[in-house]
């Protein structure tokens, strides 16, 4: 079930667009935030509010790689391994996450605290390597810095 | 007039159609894959590319609209090259498993590759693989074969209106899935299966059991289930129906089917079918020869007739049997047994409602063209969900919404919820008030047209104060006014009347109100019909008060026509209705009954009383294709040939007469033939060589069917009133019954669920439909579930004043919080067992409203 606030939020989003379908993508984001990932319940909730059949909502969402199509940990780490980041050692950081946090690319640690998503460019080539944790942005990463950052997320 | 030139040939066009359509009209073939005539244009596969002079690039013929002077080429070296390329791309990810694929032989991709493709692919990388999905019991998906043409999606969304499947993922990974990714949760119409050009979505019913080229005959007939009367084509191999498909262009359903019509055919070959006549000896059935059984039936009926007179025998006809069967049935009852005691299950709603409507609005008032619904500007839906009762009619309402028409519903209609309905949901038991309110407000804005003075007098008598209505019904003033505005502004409106209205408290009064509303807005009425030949049976005279052609038996001048033709005298008094038959059987006044293709024990209220009544008879003969609950009580059971095993005609709810054809061979006799044999044994000759001869007699004696022949029917224009004026009968006084309004309070009430996937008990003999909807359930709202701490699958005992059933629970948020919904489809678990026979005094339809239900968790079962 979506919270009252989330329902209001989706309704407000709906009001900004000429058609329900146009409001689908942002509405799905709200549901994803509430449910943690795009579970069947998340789609059903959006479908009920917007009056869009749930199969269609799911079809649209699966087109986009950046939605969470699987259950994820409480925090999502999105690390870039594209050219600049790779040159500046992002792949070592991937190994570090694996060894230090039991975090495999595309996987979730055993405690469900973190999930790791390998990203293509996140537009921080000048300050590579870079990552996002949930909606927070971090650059000039080192192993130590990562430890410090992740310590903040429970 | 537009002229285009295709491949050097000038083609004149009335209007600007697509280049593809222009080419096809001139017999020029352009290869296509994503194009389908039933669907919205898409232009996705690029196979139909053509060269157009003065246009820089190749154009897709399926989307390009022709313009005057266009010069087009469809077969050039360049195009061949392009098509080869496209096909090569399509095959990149295709498993090329044709030898194992059921589609091979009718696969559009296979045919195109054979014609335009290369012999050898150059692709060296790994193919996308998607595992075969066998999660669904009816539809199997092999998405490795999908070419992403989206025909299925456009069908499901744009035409069927179910929107149950979508393209998922992106690029080379895209394919089609229902919401769950596995099992479908949809209307199971199978129309997606029809349009898929490859073997990506197919029916599991005939999986790997035949090849398309092994079908020698495509037999066109009529669906056995509901009153819409869809055209179906039976594909048969070795006397087994392998597949049922629609035909594009057929007049009622134009290439569409519903789940029952497409997947419900397996009852035909069901092993439980009766194979031999049965005679009960010392309480147990023994197989008997036809001679033995028929002479026994003849003797016992003769005894009853001669000993007690025709009034002591009665017969129940069948809305599943053909017109010919039913005609012979009533002729047998009237001529051989000398009685008008003939009725059917149509008495539980359709028959009474229709006579009520025809008395006011004229005969034939309900015979309106189903396809016309989609061209209405307003469709008002009352009495339940047409998309489950008459699904193909439901599609026409959806299509009306798609064309910008307004859908108005009294109550929540689930199957129309995505079609922008203006909905008024009256509180429980306040529907009458709401209808009064609507009528009252209409009366203030519209003039009475003056064409039906008797009716107008009645309308004028009504005295209602609308202010209270809105309050009591619990609808908002804004919604009410919006609803009315649309209704009163309608130019070409239609009103759909379903059984929920007909089987409710004060149904005749509600019908009166709806008809009055209809009169004021000058609309057309559609009366939903749950059985394939319900209308035909009435028109054949299988009613206690009318002769074939709907001529009242009470009028001597009408009787005379039949008496002359049949050289007999017909009793002048109307006979017993089906309910009166049960009463008289119970009291002992009725001695013998002949029941053809009907299961009254199950399909009438108060099964206990009916059971006692039928047991009380001296003699009961039941003729059917399965041994039903009623059959088990019989002295003699006669097996008959069923749908697809015999010739004949059905009349649908539009009063369109259509041909039923024999597709599979089975040993046995048609219902009419068995009756003729019994007649012969009773000394009356019924000499008919075949169904057509019977039909010729029908068209001779029934004014409604005058001059109609099988030939004429085949042309598809056998519609009521056939070559004549609508027959307005003698208008009787308009009497209706309002009934008392119940107070809802905090109680639970019984509701009759009419599922999309079942129709009577017949559909429960079709395994695919059973897979979709396997058992009787008690469906409750989430709030009721919470209140009783029930979850789906828990067993509950549902008890009313009439009976009690133990059922698993289903929870559905579309169910009203005060209702417990139960179907009447599963033997031994039917809702009618929970209903006492309380009827509307005018329509005689049983009241299935306000029946209090006691719900309790049931641990014992
Ligand atoms: S069977 Fe009908 S409702 Fe189900 S997915 Fe196919 S087209 Fe849609
Ligand atoms: S499943 Fe069939 S109809 Fe649907 S997109 Fe794939 S190939 Fe086309
Ligand atoms: S709508 Fe009625 S007649 Fe048509 S396929 Fe479905 S059950 Fe058969
Ligand atoms: S048929 Fe024209 S693009 Fe597919």
Image (cartoon, rainbow, N blue to C red):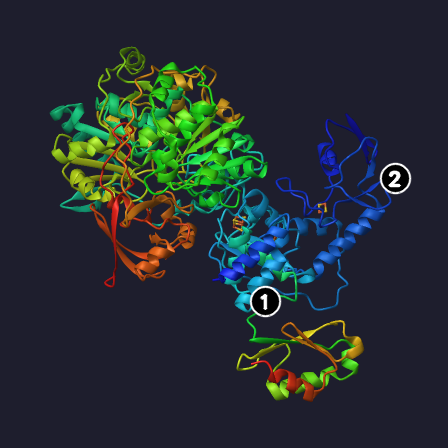
Q: Tag 1: Cα neighbours inside 10 Å, few (<14), some, or many (≥20)?
A: some
Residue B238: x percent and y percent? 47, 46
Q: Is residue B629 above or below residue B785?
A: above
Disc number placed over residue B177 in the picture, else none: none
What residue occupies the far top of the structure in this picture?
B557
Residue A46: x percent and y percent? 54, 57
Image quadrant in which the C terminus of chain B is located? bottom left
Asked whether B821 or B289 is in front, the reply is B821
The answer to whether one can see residue B830 in this image is no
Q: Tag 2: Cα neighbours inside 10 Å, few (<14), some, or many (≥20)?
A: few
The answer to whether one can see residue B836 in this image is yes
Q: Is residue B358 above or below residue B184?
A: above
Residue B430: x percent and y percent? 34, 38
Residue B513: x percent and y percent? 37, 28
Discs 1/2, front = 1
Which residue appears at 35% of the width and 39% of the height? B472
Disc number placed over residue B54 in the picture, else none: 2
Q: Is residue A93 above or below residue B554?
A: below
Which residue appears at 14% of the width and 28% of the height? B303
Image quadrant in which the N terminus of chain B is located? top right
Asked whether B287 or B750 is in front, the reply is B750
Considering the numbered disc 2 on the image, is that residue within a helix, a strand or a loop? loop
Considering the numbered disc 1 on the image, is that residue within a helix, a strand or a loop? loop
Labels 1 and 2 within one chain: no
Which residue appears at 22% of the width and 43% of the height? B607
> The residue marked by circle 2 belongs to what chain?
B
Q: Is residue A2 left or right of residue B28?
A: left
Q: Quadrant of residue B707?
A: top left
Residue that numbered label 1 is attached to: A69
Q: Are marks 1 and 2 in contact (CB under 8 Å)?
A: no
């Amino acid at each position: 079930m979506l919270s009252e606030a989330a329902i209001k939020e989706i309704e407000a989003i709906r009001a900004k667009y000429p058609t329900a379908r146009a409001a689908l993508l942002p509405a799905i984001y709200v549901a994803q935030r509430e449910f943690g990932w795009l579970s069947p319940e998340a789609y059903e909730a959006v479908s009920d509010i917007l009056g869009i059949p749930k199969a269609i909502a799911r079809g649209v969402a699966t087109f986009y790689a950046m939605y969470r199509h699987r259950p994820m940990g409480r925090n999502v780490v999105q690390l870039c391994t594209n050219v600049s980041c790779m040159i500046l050692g992002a792949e070592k950081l991937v190994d570090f996450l694996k060894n230090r946090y039991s975090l495999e690319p595309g996987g979730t640690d055993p405690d469900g605290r973190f999930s790791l998503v390998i990203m293509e460019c996140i537009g921080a080539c000048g300050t590579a390597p870079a990552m996002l944790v949930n909606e927070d942005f971090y650059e000039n990463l080192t192993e130590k810095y990562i430890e410090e950052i992740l310590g903040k997320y429970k | 007039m537009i002229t285009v030139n295709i491949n050097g040939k000038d083609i004149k066009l009335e209007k600007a159609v697509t280049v593809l359509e222009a080419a096809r009209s001139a017999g020029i073939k352009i290869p296509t894959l994503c194009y389908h005539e039933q669907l919205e244009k898409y232009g996705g596969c690029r196979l139909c590319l053509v060269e157009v002079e003065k246009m820089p690039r190749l154009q897709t013929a399926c989307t390009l609209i022709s313009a005057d002077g266009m010069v087009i080429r469809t077969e050039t070296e360049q195009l061949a090259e392009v098509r080869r390329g496209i096909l090569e791309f399509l095959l990149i990810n295709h498993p090329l498993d044709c030898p194992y694929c059921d589609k091979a032989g009718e696969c559009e991709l296979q045919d195109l590759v054979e014609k335009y493709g290369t012999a050898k692919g150059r692709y060296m990388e790994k193919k996308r693989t998607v595992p075969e999905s066998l999660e669904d019991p009816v539809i199997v998906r092999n998405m490795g074969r999908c070419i992403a043409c989206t025909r299925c999606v456009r069908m499901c969304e744009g035409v069927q209106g179910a929107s149950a499947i979508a393209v998922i993922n992106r690029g080379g990974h895209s394919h089609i899935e229902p919401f769950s990714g596995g099992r479908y949760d949809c209307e199971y119409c199978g129309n997606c299966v029809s349009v898929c050009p490859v073997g990506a979505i197919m029916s599991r019913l005939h999986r790997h059991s035949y090849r398309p080229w092994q079908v020698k005959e495509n037999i066109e007939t009529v669906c056995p289930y509901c009153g819409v009367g869809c055209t179906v084509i039976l594909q048969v191999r070795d006397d087994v129906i392998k597949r049922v498909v629609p035909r594009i262009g057929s007049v009622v359903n134009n290439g569409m089917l519903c789940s029952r019509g497409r997947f419900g055919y397996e009852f035909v070959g069901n092993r439980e079918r009766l194979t031999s006549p049965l005679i009960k000896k010392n309480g147990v059935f023994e197989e008997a020869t036809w001679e033995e059984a028929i002479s026994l039936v003849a003797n016992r009926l003769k005894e009853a007739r001669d000993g007690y007179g025709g009034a002591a025998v009665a017969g129940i006809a069948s809305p599943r049997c053909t017109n010919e069967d039913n005609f012979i049935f009533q002729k047998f009852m009237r001529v051989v047994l000398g009685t008008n005691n003939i009725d059917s299950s149509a008495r539980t709603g359709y028959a009474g409602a229709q006579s009520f409507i025809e008395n006011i609005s004229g005969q034939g008032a309900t015979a309106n063209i189903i396809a016309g619904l989609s061209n209405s500007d307003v469709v008002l839906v009352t009495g339940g969900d047409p998309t489950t009762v008459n699904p193909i009619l439901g599609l026409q309402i959806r299509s009306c919404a798609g064309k910008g028409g307004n859908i108005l519903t009294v109550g929540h209609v689930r199957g129309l919820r995505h079609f922008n309905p203006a909905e008024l949901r009256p509180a429980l038991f306040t529907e009458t008030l709401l209808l009064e309110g609507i009528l009252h407000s209409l009366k203030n804005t519209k003039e009475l047209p003056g064409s039906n003075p008797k009716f107008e007098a009645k309308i004028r008598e009504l005295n209602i104060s609308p202010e209270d209505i809105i309050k009591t019904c619990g609808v908002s003033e804004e919604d009410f006014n919006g609803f009315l505005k649309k209704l009163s502004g309608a130019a070409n409106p239609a009103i759909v009347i379903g059984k929920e209205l007909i089987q409710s408290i004060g149904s005749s009064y509600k019908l009166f109100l709806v008809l009055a509303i209809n009169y004021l807005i000058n609309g057309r009425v559609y009366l939903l019909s749950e059985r394939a030949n319900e209308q035909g049976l009435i028109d054949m005279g299988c009613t206690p008060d009318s002769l074939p052609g709907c001529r009242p038996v009470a009028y001597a001048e009408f009787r005379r026509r039949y008496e002359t033709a049949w050289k007999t005298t017909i009793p002048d008094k109307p006979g017993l209705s089906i309910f009166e038959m049960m009463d008289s059987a119970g009291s002992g006044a009725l001695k013998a009954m002949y029941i053809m293709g009907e299961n009254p024990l199950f399909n009438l209220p108060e099964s206990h009383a009916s059971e006692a009544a039928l047991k009380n008879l001296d003699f009961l003969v039941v003729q059917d294709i399965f041994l039903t609950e009623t059959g088990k009580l019989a002295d003699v059971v006669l097996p008959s040939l069923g749908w697809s095993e015999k010739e004949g005609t059905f009349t649908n709810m539009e009063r369109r007469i259509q041909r039923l054809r024999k597709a599979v061979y089975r040993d046995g006799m048609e219902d009419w033939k068995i009756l003729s044999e019994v007649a012969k044994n009773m000394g009356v000759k019924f000499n008919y060589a075949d169904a057509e001869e019977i039909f010729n007699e029908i068209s001779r004696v029934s004014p409604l069917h005058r001059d109609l022949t099988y030939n004429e029917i085949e042309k598809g224009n056998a519609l009521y009133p056939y070559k004549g004026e609508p027959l307005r009968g003698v208008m009787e006084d308009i009497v209706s019954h309002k009934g008392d309004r119940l107070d809802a309070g905090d109680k639970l009430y019984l509701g009759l669920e009419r599922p999309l996937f079942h129709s009577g008990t017949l559909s429960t003999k079709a395994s695919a439909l059973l897979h979709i909807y396997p058992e009787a359930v008690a469906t409750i709202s989430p709030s009721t579930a919470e209140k009783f701490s029930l979850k789906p699958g828990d067993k509950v005992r549902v008890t009313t004043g009439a009976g009690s059933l133990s059922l698993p629970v289903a929870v559905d948020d579309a169910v009203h919080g005060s209702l417990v919904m139960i179907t009447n489809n599963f033997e031994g678990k039917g809702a009618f067992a929970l209903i006492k026979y309380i009827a509307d005094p005018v329509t005689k339809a049983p009241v299935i409203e306000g029946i209090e239900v006691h719900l309790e968790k049931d641990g014992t079962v």
